[in-house]
Amino acid sequence: MFRVIFILVLLIFVGPISASGEKLIITEKDINETIFYNDFTIPYTDELFIDWDKVNLLLDKLENEIYQKPVNATLDKNDQIIPEKQGARLNRSKFLTIFMNSFYGQSSKKIKLPKKNTFPKVDSELLSEIKSNELESYQTYFKESNKERTINIRLAVKAINNHVVFPYEEFSFNNVVGERTKERGYKKAPVIVKGELAEDIGGGICQVSSTLFNAVNLKGIEIVERYSHSRSVPYVPPGKDATVSWWGPDFVFKNNYSHPVLIRAKTEGGKVIVTLYSSNDAYHR
């Protein structure tokens, strides 16, 4: 409705629309694009109207070219804060205003692509608040001599380290760690399949999910989804494991604390250590 009214007002005050080969030149770092208005019109009787499907495709294209993902603040190995970084995305409404004014004004323009900042979920202030109050810690042991399994463990540990789970938010091990593939550096190592030992890509990461399970198995954390292996494993007591598989079981928990919870994970020698932190003011219901 707004677009129809806008076009009618323009027809009254500006007169018939004519793009007549005019253009808009866009520049932004590596982006240098020329847009001809004739490419975004629909002939209708003696006038030209905007093809909004084409405009939306243009907006999506420019968005993909300009988008920069914000980066959360994190802790380094010495527990020092690495500050967050703002991201950027296309300011769609501002670009549309420029596009429309130039289109209906029948003039060529050269513009810098309008952007707006995007902000990370975790900034330095939040991280400093939740990094000092330890809620729980748990560690397990592995043989570093098994190089393939060690690589898999370290990759999974790196993936969950510094992850912040906000109040009433769920943490999914599979979603956070991602698919275990050769392309991502994972190796073939022993796994348990239907009670039998076998080899598969990513073998060993169940030790990480099991260590995490024991660290978060406390009041204030709700275990949403957890499965045990079909046979006992050597790194945790019976019934204290959490098996995971990309196309199968997941380990999921929910943060019921009043404040975000920070996961710190590391390998130290032949140990996997997972520690949970939150604010001094954190409480649970």
Image (cartoon, helix red, strand yellow):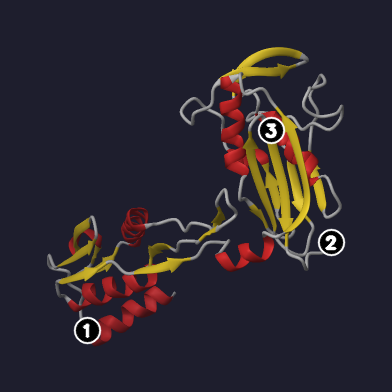
- Tell me the SS state at disc 1: loop
254 on left or right of 144? right
Q: Position of residue 167 (x, y in %)?
A: 73, 60
Front residue of this view, candidates 40 and 214: 214
Observer-side mark, 2 or 3, equals 3
What's the CA distance linking mark 2 and mark 3?
30 Å
Front residue of this view, candidates 81 and 62: 81
Q: Which residue is mark 3?
A: 271
Q: Which residue is mark 2?
A: 284
**Residue type at the position of mark 2:** His
- Residue drawn 78% across and 15% down? 195
- Tell me the SS state at disc 3: strand
Observer-side mark, 3 or 1, equals 3
Question: Which quadrant would residue 248 be assigned to in this image?
Answer: top right
73 on left or right of 27? right
Contact, mark 2 vs mark 3 (Cβ under 8 Å):
no
The numbered mark, 3 or 1, whose residue comes first in the sequence reads: 1
Q: Which residue is mark 1?
A: 14
- Give the class, few, some or many, for how many residues have Cα within 10 Å of label 2's Cα (few <14, many ≥20): few
